[in-house]
Amino acid sequence: MNTLGIGLIGTGYMGKCHALAWNSVAATFGTDIRPRLVHLGEVNETLAKQRATEFGFEKSSGDWRAVIDDPDVQIVSITSPNQFHKDMVIAALDAGKHVWCEKPMSTGLQDAEAMLMAAERTDRLCVLGYNYIQSPAFRQIETLVKNGRIGRVTNIRVEMDEDFMAAPDMLHSLKHRAESGHGALDDFAVHPLSLLQRLCGLPVEVMADAARPYETLKDAHGVDKKVETFDIASALMRFRDGLTGTLIVNRSAWGRKGRIALQILGTEGSILFDQERANEFQLYQRSDELEIQGFRTVLIAPIHTPYNHFVPAPGHGLGFNELKVIEANEILKALSGKPARLVDFSDGIQIERVVHAMAQSHASGKWTSTLG
Amino acid sequence: MNTLGIGLIGTGYMGKCHALAWNSVAATFGTDIRPRLVHLGEVNETLAKQRATEFGFEKSSGDWRAVIDDPDVQIVSITSPNQFHKDMVIAALDAGKHVWCEKPMSTGLQDAEAMLMAAERTDRLCVLGYNYIQSPAFRQIETLVKNGRIGRVTNIRVEMDEDFMAAPDMLHSLKHRAESGHGALDDFAVHPLSLLQRLCGLPVEVMADAARPYETLKDAHGVDKKVETFDIASALMRFRDGLTGTLIVNRSAWGRKGRIALQILGTEGSILFDQERANEFQLYQRSDELEIQGFRTVLIAPIHTPYNHFVPAPGHGLGFNELKVIEANEILKALSGKPARLVDFSDGIQIERVVHAMAQSHASGKWTSTLG
Amino acid sequence: MNTLGIGLIGTGYMGKCHALAWNSVAATFGTDIRPRLVHLGEVNETLAKQRATEFGFEKSSGDWRAVIDDPDVQIVSITSPNQFHKDMVIAALDAGKHVWCEKPMSTGLQDAEAMLMAAERTDRLCVLGYNYIQSPAFRQIETLVKNGRIGRVTNIRVEMDEDFMAAPDMLHSLKHRAESGHGALDDFAVHPLSLLQRLCGLPVEVMADAARPYETLKDAHGVDKKVETFDIASALMRFRDGLTGTLIVNRSAWGRKGRIALQILGTEGSILFDQERANEFQLYQRSDELEIQGFRTVLIAPIHTPYNHFVPAPGHGLGFNELKVIEANEILKALSGKPARLVDFSDGIQIERVVHAMAQSHASGKWTSTLG
Amino acid sequence: MNTLGIGLIGTGYMGKCHALAWNSVAATFGTDIRPRLVHLGEVNETLAKQRATEFGFEKSSGDWRAVIDDPDVQIVSITSPNQFHKDMVIAALDAGKHVWCEKPMSTGLQDAEAMLMAAERTDRLCVLGYNYIQSPAFRQIETLVKNGRIGRVTNIRVEMDEDFMAAPDMLHSLKHRAESGHGALDDFAVHPLSLLQRLCGLPVEVMADAARPYETLKDAHGVDKKVETFDIASALMRFRDGLTGTLIVNRSAWGRKGRIALQILGTEGSILFDQERANEFQLYQRSDELEIQGFRTVLIAPIHTPYNHFVPAPGHGLGFNELKVIEANEILKALSGKPARLVDFSDGIQIERVVHAMAQSHASGKWTSTLG
């Protein structure tokens, strides 16, 4: 059996999530290639050592370049803060490594373009970490849509909401400053757009608005500071062939914890999904007999691959972290030359161009093309 | 006890709904004024006679003017097609009658303005039939919002969806022709806007888009005819004081039967409501202890007046028609000089101006003021 | 058009509910027979007069016998406390009136048997007020079951829960004394049993247990008093042909307001219903394709008669009181010689025998036949 | 850091689940003890070898005794069919190994008693695999109940339903023969009982009934064979201090996939849970203000430990397999001398005695003590 030497940069939320995925993927899927957890990089060297032991890595470093330079490393998981993605990705690719970089590509379109160029000059795998497309429920939804099960899609709506920036008494922080980006659009919009990309393609024209719940917040010293970012954004979207839709994102929506709510309306039926209940989706079919027409709630089951690799019985549910295990398996499939379901840099930059166009349209108050 | 002589014009869906309300309101509320069902008007004289017997009216006519001229009639329920509202309302007011006219005021803003002028030159009651504001659940929601229970509202979203125009094989009809209006905006938008008007005021600026699921449909002769109206519309809304929101209406949304879904997000909590489950609403409060924070589903109960006038026990539920009974009671309260919860012509025309601005912004592709 | 002279005894919850039904039934259904609200009886004469005006009755009396003796009265709605049912029903039948008596028949089986005998010696209509069987959702469920849509029923579960006797600080009252009956079994069990009677017949053998949440409660003087009734009861049930089921009733179940939760499991599918969301039911069919199997939530629609008589559009919902309007219409149908859907005294006594057998089995600790 | 040598017997559903848990527990929890996957036993030697590679075990054997005898193995995960548990557990304990054995202990009470005796003569850890007690939602429910959040529990109901034995055309198999046990009681009842054990203790007296959906089924040769087991069972339960409850299990309940539905009713509130939506629970508190009383749906969040070890953000959800990771961590805690949340053999046998008493009461038709 082949092994794949894993390097991991970053040990935060996503770093741990990658580590768990690399630990579980072979046992879950019985993969041809078995990951070997080689080298963990984390700026705090002591922490790096501790996490390496916990996560099962052989080596650790305080310098991410050591991970990339390690000859035993063949793929680098990059889970550092977004502003470091560009340099790490380009260095890794130039060193001949495969790359699995968490979304978004970077903090600005220009950096993302540079990353795409680096990707285009290698034959290495360049994957962006878009785990929501991996969910068995979403895969089934995509299949239903593609098989025409709800006919032609006529209207699509997506909302992504959390409440981690909702509290009136939170302190003014980096996320409230313009340098951190536009706000909710940057934090969230790429996720629902990655779903739309697979369902109906990305919008070609957008018209967005944005708002902030608080004009000022106090900093740690009790001083009122202006909030410069937008925790709330909404957009009208026009797709090819007359399809329209809406996207709403909000990181100050009390009560919403991990909501990504999709409504897909078609000429023959409708599909609903909410990431907060990720193990089910709802389908309405107009072809059902009139007396018993209704949205059916489908619980994911072994028939909804790759759920079957986790549990052989229906209705037992997968967790968020297990989406990453599925994504890791897709990477191993790609490396084995099999068809794989992944967001590469070329797909990813299109998503980010849409976000950029939304921010622009908010600034200009005008419909804006996403095609650059 | 005083009686109130009722005239009713129209015997369709809303005509019957008014008739049922006038039949039940005294028994339900023990009103000071007792309605006396005097005169029913309906263009088909035979049908008028039959319905008068069924509905309990003393007289019937094939001519609506006979209803208005009847000296025993003190208030006229107008439930005819929208294009007739103007003439009927003005005639009724000029004859010194009170008016309860189904929404929308008319088919165009100009007619509505004429109706408003007629209203302003009388002291008669001029009520528009906006029953959704009467629901006990919505009343409680409004109270919670007004009492600051969810703090300051920071984002508001409303969707109204049905599927009666969703079928690909439906015949091309009047509703597909431009003469019937803009489409879903006209049919639906006034309802959610009547709710917003009470919760946070109407938007001052809007940006809308619209679409149609089918470019052409066959007529009764099998000939392809162009669809001119828009079954789908979405709008970005800006309110006073920085509040933003979205409104989406769709009369071709498979599986949706009477959906009016509200999401009201505030600095201290959130409220959710869906007219398809009109006897409940959901509330999230950030002040709840962390371990048990969640959306609570509140079933309407006697404490949520005027539910108590229908059933003394909680959780038994009201139906759609009973909203009209509540509205009739509000009219009787107004006629007794008590404070009443109603949409008058002055409120109503503001709602319709917003719809008009949305249609304009769709045509122009620009943000449009609703203030005229 | 024929009229039917209505007498009503009682002006409480159910009295008002009957009055509303008699006021609305003709307008709702366009009935052949039009009710004429003749005579209202209520022990408090002043209240009787007031309610007669509100409810639209021509006359009122402080003596129920005056209602029964009134020659203009052809049917008597009996909504007085249960202990008076027997005398009133027998007197009404003996006076040649039709009877619509609220459930249960009486406070003991012996009285009920006497009422049945009185019914058997007349040709008058003897109806018990079991409104839950009238719900459009339940009617559709019954049709689905009878048409074999879920195959043969293999297991049935029903729970009825409210919380009006849940508070630890409520005062000791009549309902806590043995003279008021067994407790939740008497208050509630007849309702779910009326549904089972139509779905799968009544159980032939039962085994019940019962409990009380509080051993003692304080009376108005602060004195601890023993609770003698049982607010909680559960029963195992055996039906003909090997079917088994469970019935659970609880009038001290915090949070439950009007729950009647049915689970009907069959060889080909399952059906779920909850009276707290009475305008919908859920159906699972094993014949659906595997990828999209799930419980579908069906909202009641015009196809689910007689919902269409109230609203011509789906998803708008009926309220609890409207079930009584449907029941009144069934009575008018029966009086016109048409097939009607009603619980007569012969059906009703069978329901009460089951409740009696449950109470007995609780006392004896043994499986008990319901067949007497 | 200490390591713990893992032996695993069995590679089916639960075998894989244990393997995944041992692979992930250190990375998830940053445990003091790091598992070392030493030896995998599986009767098919080729399969054993393949799975050992996939699961990351160093060695494999076709003979389970080799696993137990391996000096590098310190704990043995036993996931073989139930009839082999006794011999394996006793051999492992006698060899000085810790044991983590999947529930139920064995196929009969006598074997379980022998296992308990073996456990009592060692100081090794003897854990039964009851993963549902590990769920963050259930842990929070237990805490709420123990802290008196819903007052004293007055009524408890639990249902466990799946549909893998619901099809009328399934073939007659071992599970339909008496030698496989009683049926659904054996398969399912231990799970809900493990939850009750923690919430309110086990029942002291039970009264059960059971049924089968099909009297006969065809075998592979098309021959009708009698079904001897019971796919459906229901029980009345009496606990100490007057508490009563019901338990219903059904492995032929169409549409139910992994339902374990709990209703816990108390003097101050109620709690609801369903394993099919395992990442949430519902709480009703009578202390809430009347206008906003309702069941709140709480999504699991970092405050509900140990969810925080998997994801630092709320609402992202855990999957079924992750319960086993939590259970593995509890074992490591126990081995480190820390308090741990586990079902040991002494707890487990009490659960199985209740199941046994239920089966007996079904046979005798009488209330049966669970205390032996």
Image (tube, coloured by chain):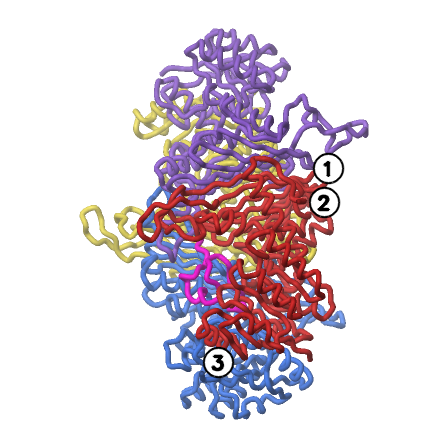
Chain colours: A purple, B red, C blue, D yellow
Q: Amino acid at mark 2?
A: Gly
Q: Residues within 10 Å of mark 1 (few under 14, many from 20)?
A: some
Which of discs 3 and 2 lies nearer the camera? The answer is: 3
Image x and y of residue D6, in percent: 46, 26
Q: Amino acid at mark 3?
A: Arg
Image x and y of residue A25, in percent: 43, 25
Quickly name the residue at label 3: C34
The reply to whether the C-beta atoms of the residues labelled 1 and 2 are less than 8 Å apart is yes
**Of residues D115 and B290, the one drawn nearer to the viewer in this rendering:** B290
Residue D115 falls in which quadrant of the image?
A: top left
- Element at badge 2? loop
Residue C9 is one of the magenta-drawn residues: no
Q: CA distance from mark 3 to mark 2?
A: 52 Å
**Residue C92 visible in the picture:** yes
- Element at badge 1? loop
Q: CA distance from mark 1 to mark 2?
A: 10 Å
Quickly name the residue at label 1: A168
Q: Amino acid at mark 1?
A: Pro
What span is colored magenta in the figure? C297-322
Q: Numbered disc 3: what chain?
A: C
Residue appearing at x 53%, y 78% in the figure: B59
Residue appearing at x 67%, y 73% in the figure: B31
Quickly name the residue at label 2: B151
